[in-house]
Image (cartoon, grey):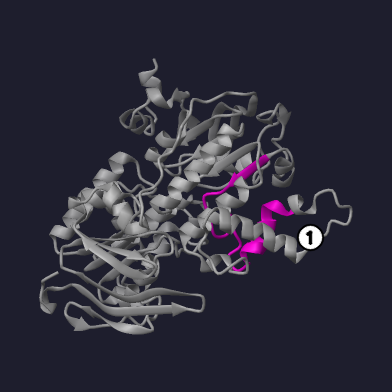
Amino acid sequence: MDETASTRRLELRHVTKRYPSVVANDDVSLCVAPGEIHAVLGENGAGKSTLMKVIYGAVKPDAGEMLFDGVPFLAKNPRDARAHGIAMVFQHFSLFETLSVAENIWLGLDKSISLNQVRESIASTAQKYGLPLEADRPVHTLSVGERQRVEIMRSLLTQPKLLILDEPTSVLTPQAVEKLFDTLKQLAASGCSILYISHKLDEIRALCTNCTVLRGGKVTGMVDPRKESNASLSRLMIGAEPPQLQHREASLGEIALSVKKLSLKSEAMFCTDLLDISFDVRAGEIVGIAGVSGNGQQELLAALSGESTRAPRGSVLLFGNDIAAKNPQARRAGGLYFVPEERLGRGAVPVHSLAMNGLLTRASDLVGSSWLKWITPKQNASLAGEVISRFNVKAGGHDAVAKSLSGGNLQKYIVGREISAKPKVLIVSQPTWGVDVGAAAQIRGELLKLRDEGCAVLVVSEELDELFELCDRMHVVAKGRLSPSIATRDASVELIGEWMSGLWEKQNA
């Protein structure tokens, strides 16, 4: 960029951050002008999130300097960054679960603003930006998608000079994405600078005017994404184009998972009741469930995985056997495995190693038929090593703790752990959320391979492109109700977008 220092909102000079097993940022330089929407692109583990945390004061660099509005500045902590006009929406959220939405947002704002004023601001901003939120709802009752909305809302209410967004659209309908883009363009037009991290290359090309590409912690290119193709951006990011998926015609087998007239009152206030939900998934097919976060996905997945055993008797069947009251271990024994939407805390224990996290769902595989029920460290390490190798997980070996991995690499490990169990039924929530294009193609390819081997796969995702790429059939969930099934070849993004508002009955009348 050719701006003088006085016209740069943000400038990083030779920033380096080292960890014991990796150099996350290696001599990184970056400039962002006022009013610029600047993408930071890279595969999982390339150093994007670490660099954003350096800017936001959550991580201290080992070398380099930062200028903000032409003045040398290094945030002591996130509060200091916010005081200087820097706001960030993290991929992994930083919310207090026992507090309400409004209280969580209030914590990041000037305390001269009352809680009632915060509630009013939430309502008006939610209407303006298309981010529906209930101000008094406790955060622990929110889905991952709804929690992301809280983070976005909190940042918008600070009226920042620099807004950092890490995967902000993963929970939004196509219509809401368009509205958010309009909002971001308005913010940029008013002088707000935006650093935008996304693995959706179409988004970056449509929204951003500059793009810095990282690979292995180093800057490998700076381009105008509007002049690039998805293929050329992929080559800059991962050194190659992602492989094309081979989607064969489904060869259907028996009904593997059947849900029959499942109605279930939610256990907590503000959660969604399930209303008369029925569907089947056959061996050898992938069925998708689309919907905006918070419309009953969380409650449905809990009933299917065994996290909740309150489903009425006979409402959840696995190969004809009633499993409505069975716990997750019993369901796995019957061949049903599950990938939750929440990586840290549900999919993996943050402070445990990858090897120990393998035991969460694979202990019975390692025990086998041995009456001693003893698992050796060598067996455990071997299982973790196989998943790391097969799914190209970037980690410091099987002893690396889960929270040390980037979000995308942890996702690859969790998905790989369940796929390598050779399930008969696999339920996956948000399979490629926060995952780079190469890793996403790999995960989707593995799901298709599993389906072709006769597994019944249910994918719950808010990524419509993903569902169209993977699924043989789709449903939509809205306000706890499930739409009819529609063959993917007969569906369109516009139709599914309308159904996500609960309008399928009118169209099928």
Name the image quarter holding the N terminus.
Answer: bottom left
Residue 244: x and y in percent read 40, 40
**What residue is shown at x 26% (from left), y 83% (from top)?**
73
Q: For this view, does 458 lie left or right of residue 189?
A: right
Q: Is residue 269 above or below residue 250?
A: below
Decide which of 86, 389 is in the foreground and name it: 389
Name the image quarter holding the C terminus.
Answer: top left
Q: Amino acid at mark 1?
A: Ile
> How many numbered markers are drawn?
1
Q: For this view, does 109 lie left or right of residue 358?
A: left
Decide which of 84, 352 is in the foreground and name it: 352
Residue 435: x and y in percent read 43, 53
**What residue is shown at x 43% (from left), y 38% (from top)?**
245
Whether residue 431 is visible, yes or no, is no
Residue 103 position by quadrant: bottom left
User: Per the image, is 176 magenta?
Assistant: no
The stretch in magenta equals: 336-363
Q: Which residue does the numbered mark 1 point to in the structure image?
A: 375
Q: Secondary structure at mark 1?
A: loop
Residue 454: x and y in percent read 61, 31
